[in-house]
Amino acid sequence: MGFGLLVILLYMRILGIETSFDETAAAVVENDSSGKFTLLSNVVASSADLHMQYGGVVPEIAARSHIESILPVIEKALTDAFPSNKLARPGLAKSELWSNIDAIAVTRGPGLSGSLLIGVLTARTLAILHNKPLYAVNHVLAHPYASFITSLGESFAKGLTLSKFSRQLVLPQNQPKFPMLALIVSGGHTQLAFFDDHSKYSVLGRTTDDAVGEAYDKVAKILGLPFPGGPSVEKLAIAGSSEAVKLPTPKTKNVYDFSYSGLKTAVLRSAQAAIGEDYGFPSHMLAERLSKAQKIDIAASFNQKAMEILVKKTIKAYREFAPKSIVVAGGVAASRELRRQLDEKSPLKPIYPDPKLCTDNAAMIAARAAFVIDSSDAFDPFTLEIQPNLEM
Ligand code: KG4
Ligand code: ZN
């Protein structure tokens, strides 16, 4: 007679809340004691279309939009995550839904103050009301954690969450291994970080001026393309020649730092030169004077160079620090040109999140919190404050 091995899995379900910029997001992540991470729901309401006419995010509009969206977004994240509760009792069985949640994690910084406030105050209130432990998360640090989620919950599998707010996602089969090199690239941040493990990490380099996504947004403005700039520049670049316009490779004191403001200025100068004007010609009048062919070539050359800079430094860091995994994260990780160049140059297959988990989301916030819950104390829901200038 043999003895069967009884393995008891413990489950932890975390509600993540993210409102640092222009996306109002909530998600429920479940992790079990075997280390498996399951995304039960992922809801994102973006106010990007409201900012489009201004060519950039307007903090006041973002904050107002968070106020309107935050509660419906959280409710949807809960009902998506636990559809049986929802189906059993139409009209939201709220206490039953909340009894499934073990902790709340919220972004406390970095980000826009007004935007962060809405998320943090909501999380604090909910933590007090429903008596849940509250954890505060650094948004930039959380970005790579989108890649630690390896399975989708029942509601995704059944397509129950196929709505305007959440769509089917493709996840990696395995979690990243440590030591991990993370390239975190978005509209607000550009940095290379090296993680020995979840709690020990260092920033190898960061941007000394503009973030890479910000440079895309500014180049898009010069070319008369819609905001956000990344996708629109990339779309236009497809038909162009990346060799057409010579652009400089910026120099930085620390080899792992980044600089994008010089590259953006070089794009401006080449656009002015293309129409035979000098540096005094106003940038907002360039788009109407440039031909389609000129715009396409500028977009292609910029797209190639902007990504080459990221790839060269990532590969250099890989050679120096020999990580076991390379994770790319943030809105710019959606770039096909970045993936093309990095896949070609990297000896190790890089891990990219699903494009919907590249841009801001709450799944990464909940996933990051899951790793620190055992080793850190919960925050006091009566006093947790935002940190708009928080660094990694
Ligand atoms: O992570 P994210 O949603 O928000 C921030 O935290 O900033 O990143 C948004 C940024 C924008 O600047 C956008 O232009 C850029 O990511 N982006 C891209 C691409 N898709 C989005 N940049 C380059 N290529 C893309 N395909
Ligand atoms: Zn971000």
Image (tube, rainbow, N blue to C red):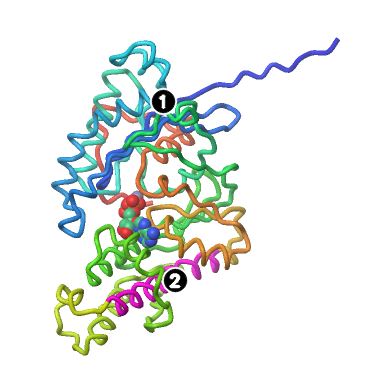
Q: Within 8 Å of ligand 2, the CB of disc 1?
A: no
- Left or right of 191? Residue 152 is right
Please state, as top left, top right, bottom left or bottom right, where the N terminus lies in the image: top right
Label the magenta part by its dominant secondary structure.
Answer: helix
Numbered circle sitting on residue 309: 2
Q: What kind of element bears circle 1?
A: helix
Label 2, residues with CA under 10 Å away: few <14, some 14-19, many ≥20: some
| Residue at the disc numbered 1 | 81
Q: What kind of element bears circle 2?
A: helix
In percent of width and height, residue 196 lies at 55, 50
- CB atoms of marks 1 and 2 within 8 Å: no
- Left or right of 132? Residue 118 is left
Residue name at image x 59 percent, y 21 percent? 9
Residue name at image x 22 percent, y 83 percent? 272
Residue name at image x 40 percent, y 53 percent? 330
Provide the residue span drawn in magenta: 292-317
In percent of width and height, residue 264 lies at 29, 74
The image quarter containing residue 62 is: top left
Q: Earlier in the sequence, mark 1 or mark 2?
A: 1
Q: Nearer the viewer, residue 69 or 291?
A: 291
Give yes or no for residue 163 being in the magenta stretch.
no
Above/below status of 306 relative to 324: below
- Left or right of 124? Residue 159 is right
